Amino acid sequence: MTEMSPASALKHMANRAITVLSRRDLARPAALLARLMTRTAISTAGANRVTSGRGKPVRVLLLPRSRFNDDAFSMLRAVGPIEVVKLPRTVLKGIAAAFLPDDLGDNNYVSASPEAERAKLRYREFLVRFWRAFDPKRRIDAVITGNFGYYAEREFGGALEILGVPFIALHKENFWSKGSQEFWEGIYRERRGPFLGRRILVYSPIERDLQVRAGVVDEPRIEVVGMPRLDELHRWRSANEGRIPRPLVLFASFHPDVSMPVLRRVALGPDGEERWTVLADQRSAIHNLDALCRSAHRAVLELATTCSDVCAVVKTKGRARDRAVLLERMGVAHESELPRNLQVVHGGSPMPFLFEASLVCGLHSTLLIEGLAAGRPVLVPWYGEVLDPAISRYIFDLGDAVIRASSPAEFLEQMKVLARVRTPVPKALPAETVRILHEWLGNEDGRAGERAATAIRRVIEATTRIAERY
């Protein structure tokens, strides 16, 4: 078991306490403890004059998650004078543990048993009382999350709607390949079901149409705003035209089952880390990119080993499963065996590395599209299992916007060449890149944060007008 830091241990103990209080139907004590776990993330009250319509700054509760935070903060700063308070998502998971069956997760929410359905109703009723104690003076104007389908938050959205508090999902997931769209349309319809909150904001028309087709939400309640965190890359590129980057390769680490049509359940382990398990009825559906995955990771290691003038950064999402397998995938037993010019980064924002990189590479990662937005050359290992049509239909294809390597040797050689070329930051992006940014991420203009902020202000102001009638 991984040893927890004192802060993580304290947070874990608080979550356990919330579960105990919830099991005893003590909504008020659970809410008071949850309030102690909140933290102010943004406070711009008085920065300008835009308000929620009640003569005071907007106050928003954010349920944070890795990478979603970048989008949320980028967007929320554009709302106007605002206070953003963070509540750990594990608080809701702690309450959910007191009501929902252990086998209920994101991807089997509507396919649950009759007993699970009754448990959901008890959970929602408790959350109504929890929220009244959590925010007794109704100071919070809206609650924002990063996905419509997180199991512990489904009934939370319903409870908030009962109380007239907008629950808004800035939905960060996107499915761009044809195979993934077909697969997830079925999952959305048959396993996740309808969104109980107020509004969903998505990055792309592709995701909007997918959710509408699947019956997650009706069209008036979903809106395309684009990926807000891409705004920063557009601003950076404009301000750094002609800049010569370092000879640095930024590699987006990926798993052998990346984007494959298989469902997992995520649960918290005893150390507070997320544990991923494949749902039993999905185990036979796993496809595999194991050879491609290993060769690409080991090519990055060979690059750093043989080219002392080139630096390499291997970036993961920072999950427990990433940390557990990365070194073995690269062919070493300990991080001390890696050369000094190769850095492993688990979690956090990739932006500082994008600003320095001369090349971005990897497979089926949003980081590749972010690299395109930054005006960086992007290299994709396109060989081995990915050539199998049964697999490639689930991997998104960036076409002529990227460079493809057709073998492990070519992948290594192209990394060497492109890292050393050090392509300057361009004045304008190629037409194919602009098309991809528009169709896939809804942000070819650097104004997604502004659009998202406008959408959230609109929801809050409409709620305020309705409340003032009564």
Image: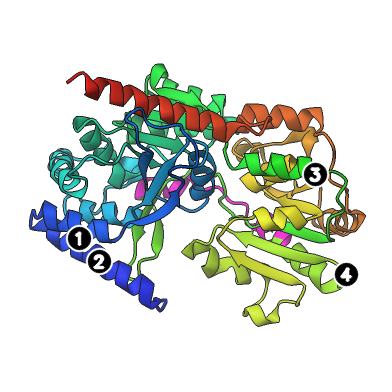
**Mark 3: which amino acid?**
Arg
Q: Mostly what secondary structure, the magenta segment?
A: helix
Question: Would you identify the image quadrant in which residue 296 lies?
Answer: bottom right
Helix, strand or loop at mark 3: strand
Q: Is residue 267 above or below residue 237?
A: below
Q: Earlier in the sequence, mark 2 or mark 3?
A: 2
In front: mark 2 or mark 3? 2
**Mark 2: which amino acid?**
Ala
In front: mark 3 or mark 1? 1
Helix, strand or loop at mark 1: helix
Residue pointed to by mark 2: 14
Q: Earlier in the sequence, mark 1 or mark 4?
A: 1
Q: CA distance from mark 1 to mark 4?
A: 52 Å
**For the point 92% across and 54% down, which residue is it?**
421
Q: Residue 294 magenta-drawn?
A: yes
Between residue 127 and residue 394, name the one nearer to us.
127
Q: Is residue 265 left or right of residue 17?
A: right
Discs 1, 2 touching: Cβ within 8 Å: yes
Q: Position of residue 364 (x, y in %)?
A: 64, 45
**Mark 1: which amino acid?**
Ile
Helix, strand or loop at mark 2: helix
Residue pointed to by mark 1: 18
Residue pointed to by mark 3: 404
Q: Residue 335 magenta-drawn?
A: no
Q: Is residue 113 above or below residue 359?
A: above
Q: Earlier in the sequence, mark 2 or mark 4?
A: 2
**For the point 33% across and 74% down, which residue is it?**
9
